[in-house]
Image: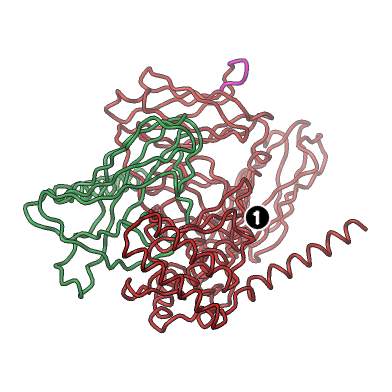
Chain colours: A red, B green
């Protein structure tokens, strides 16, 4: 019963929200417009007088009246929009609250004037600015589609400008003002790739990026290991990840270079930021650093190394540049993409899925590949300053399972390799690592010594790997997928 | 792989050199009003563009602060106590095309005062490092009858403040 009521409320709330977005704003009556005009005249008088307080008061009154007579909804606001002379543009909107579902909008000087000359007072432009900020960006914050990446930001802006253009008649914009909106929309639209342009053309303003999965925790559970970039600059902050131990929080990660040591601790996800500025300040040539992971007793549980380049690190102030992303990615692979201008916040995107970053530095990003969708999709990397070029890649799955990992002498046992979305013509190379325990037979494969190579013809399929025990013990079979060139 | 990384390093070095080569003409300076602040307090910075060349230069005086993907002349790189960058949080409604240009006389400066806390979420106590960037890629509108504007990107020195 309670569920039914809750569902009903959810449906009503959704309908109200939709109605709100489409129908909330109306054209003021002639009487109301006169009142608005009077308030705008008061703004002009205040501007001529030059008294900052009076200007603020007159503008805030006009803002309030615009909300009232154009029926601009206030549900998405954490506070009444207000005039702020410090705002450079026409409007500045930020999210507020712990859940960031509400917004705060400040309106600048330019929101009150026709943009074609910046001098002619325009009530319509003010109303349109508010539709952009409050209904556009406010709706995005409330609906969970406020994006922070470049493509998402462009889509958010296009949606807000589309709302303004759609309501241009209601707000009474001039042809010049409508042309200005169309120009701005085009400037943002030109920043999208073809796939996103097609979505926006259909009126779909969602990016629906899925947050990175944390499946690497399960995939690498067991023996501890630490993922660090192969090269870092002495003065950069690089990110690294520890996987393996059951508890990942608070592990000590030490980095030793040139006799100096830096120490830091992992967060609950096993992430750590490595800053070598102090430890590596004296190095003058590229030097290997040892990265160790210690458990709570101080015992070393994992170790790797990275090459430390003498600083200064190139500034990461622009979009990442990469030359390539592998044309084939296996779900569950760890892939390192070299490039430049990557930085600690760099992440790889495949299709609509943000990949989990295991390590990142100026020159490379290492990700754990995990996408819900298999097959051909766009892949790229991004940092806070933008996105790299996109590359088309095929994501496939390939998993091998066996009933157990031990066998008795004379026993027959079949391991199974299952694959999906693999490129036809790919070669699967199986290697028997324990010939003293088992013999291996892969039907249809060319066998040489302990290796069997099978060329697959279909994207999806199953390969039986027949094993026969020659001795009792544990066996190990490894595999490699070699996509066609 | 090594060759790839080496070439990436060389390109990055060249890019850095080209940015520095612009600096004799215009110099971007970032000044903090206070270096010790409390959480919630405005974090006022002054961004100044100084014409160090022997000739007058046209600059984009709009100095709109935004994220680099959007319309902007200024953006900040703020590194928080955890070593991560503090993102620009706001959405700015403004044209990509600036109509605000001035002729900046030789040895003259132009700048603006800006509250970093107004559009960046700076709430965690600790030490922050800030670098400002000025970028312009357009000329003044024909109606202003100005010579071609200075184009490129300038980087300021880093300044530090701490938040209690």
Residue at (56% x, 55% y) in the render: A329
Answer left or right for A330 relative to A341.
right
Q: Quadrant of residue A120?
A: bottom left
Kind of element beneath mark 1: strand
In the image, residue A114 above or below residue B33: below
Q: Nearer the viewer, residue B80 or A342?
A: B80
Q: Nearer the viewer, residue A280 or A37?
A: A37
Dot 1, how many residues are within 10 Å of its Cα: few (below 14), some (14-19), or many (20+)?
Answer: some
Residue situated furthest left in the rendering: B54
**Residue A295 in magenta stretch:** yes
Residue at (48% x, 51% y) in the render: B89
Is residue B35 visible in the rendered image? The answer is: yes
Residue situated furthest right in the rendering: A1
Q: Position of residue B86 (x, y in %)?
A: 45, 43
Q: Position of residue A481 (x, y in %)?
A: 58, 53
Q: Which residue is mark 1?
A: A397
In the image, residue A340 above or below residue A308: below
Q: Position of residue A94 (x, y in %)?
A: 51, 54
Q: Which residues are magenta?
A: A294-298
Majority SS type along the magenta span: loop
Residue at (59% x, 31% y) in the render: A267
In the image, residue B89 above or below residue A115: above
Q: Position of residue A139 (x, y in %)?
A: 60, 63
**Residue A38 in magenta stretch:** no
Answer left or right for A451 relative to A386.
right
Q: Quadrant of residue A109?
A: bottom left
Residue situated furthest top in the rendering: A297
**Chain ID of residue with mark 1:** A
Classify the position of the N terminus of chain B by image quarter.
top left
């Amino acid at each position: 019963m309670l569920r039914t009521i809750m569902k009903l409320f959810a449906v009503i709330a959704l309908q109200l929200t939709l109605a709100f977005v489409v129908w909330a704003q109306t054209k003021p009556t002639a009487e109301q417009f006169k009142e608005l005009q009077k308030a705008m005249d008061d703004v002009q008088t205040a501007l001529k007088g030059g008294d900052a307080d009076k200007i603020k008061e007159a503008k805030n009154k006009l803002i309030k009246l615009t909300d009232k007579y154009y029926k601009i909804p206030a549900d998405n606001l954490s506070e009444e929009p207000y005039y702020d002379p410090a705002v450079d543009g026409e409007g500045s909107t930020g999210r507020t609250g712990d859940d960031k579902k509400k917004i705060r909008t400040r309106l600048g000087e330019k929101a009150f004037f026709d943009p074609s000359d910046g001098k002619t007072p325009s009530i319509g432009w003010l109303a349109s600015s508010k539709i952009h900020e409050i209904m556009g960006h406010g709706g995005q914050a409330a609906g969970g589609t406020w994006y922070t990446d470049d493509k998402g930001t462009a889509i958010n802006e296009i949606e807000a400008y589309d709302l303004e253009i759609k309501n241009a008649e209601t707000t009474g914009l001039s042809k010049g003002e409508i042309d200005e909106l169309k120009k701005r929309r085009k400037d943002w639209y030109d920043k999208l790739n073809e796939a996103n342009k097609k979505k926006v053309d259909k009126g779909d303003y969602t990016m629906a990026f899925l947050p990175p999965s944390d499946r690497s925790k399960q995939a690498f559970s067991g023996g501890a290991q630490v993922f660090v970039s192969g090269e870092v600059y002495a003065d950069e902050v690089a990110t690294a990840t520890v996987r393996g131990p059951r508890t990942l929080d608070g592990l000590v990660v030490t980095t030793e270079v040139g006799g100096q040591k830096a120490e830091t601790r992992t967060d609950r996800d096993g992430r750590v930021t490595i800053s070598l500025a102090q430890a590596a300040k004296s190095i003058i040539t590229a030097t290997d650093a040892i990265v160790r992971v210690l458990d709570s007793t101080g015992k070393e549980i994992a170790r790797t190394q990275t090459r430390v380049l003498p600083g200064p690190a190139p500034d990461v102030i622009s979009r990442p540049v990469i030359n390539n992303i592998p044309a084939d990615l296996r779900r569950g692979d760890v892939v390192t993409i070299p490039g430049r201008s990557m930085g600690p916040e760099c992440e790889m995107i495949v299709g609509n899925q943000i990949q989990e970053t295991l390590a990142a530095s100026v020159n490379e990003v290492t990700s754990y590949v995990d996408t819900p969708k298999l097959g051909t999709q766009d892949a790229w990397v991004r940092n806070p300053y933008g996105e790299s070029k996109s590359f088309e890649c095929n994501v496939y799955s390939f998993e091998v399972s066996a009933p157990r990992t031990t066998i008795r002498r004379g026993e027959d046992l079949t391991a199974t390799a299952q694959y999906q979305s693999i490129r036809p013509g790919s070669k699967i190379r199986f290697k028997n690592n324990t010939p003293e325990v088992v013999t291996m037979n892969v039907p249809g494969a060319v066998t040489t010594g302990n290796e069997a190579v099978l060329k697959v013809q279909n994207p999806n399929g199953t390969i039986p790997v027949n094993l026969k025990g020659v001795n009792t013990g544990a066996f190990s079979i490894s595999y490699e997928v070699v996509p066609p060139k | 792989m090594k060759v790839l990384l080496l070439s990436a390093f060389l390109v990055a070095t060249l890019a850095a050199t080209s940015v520095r080569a612009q600096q004799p003409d215009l110099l971007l300076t970032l000044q903090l009003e206070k270096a010790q602040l409390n959480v919630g307090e405005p974090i006022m910075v002054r961004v100044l563009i100084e014409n160090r060349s022997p000739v007058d230069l046209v600059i984009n005086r709009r100095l709109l602060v935004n994220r680099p993907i959007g319309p902007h002349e200024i953006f900040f790189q703020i590194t928080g106590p955890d070593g991560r960058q503090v993102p620009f949080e706001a959405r700015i409604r403004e044209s990509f095309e600036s109509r605000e240009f001035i002729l900046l006389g030789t040895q003259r400066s132009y700048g603006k005062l800006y509250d970093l806390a107004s559009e960046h979420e700076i709430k965690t106590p600790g030490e922050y490092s800030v670098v400002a960037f000025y970028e312009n890629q357009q000329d003044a509108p024909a109606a202003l009858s100005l010579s071609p504007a200075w184009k490129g990107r300038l980087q300021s020195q880093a300044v530090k403040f701490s938040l209690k």
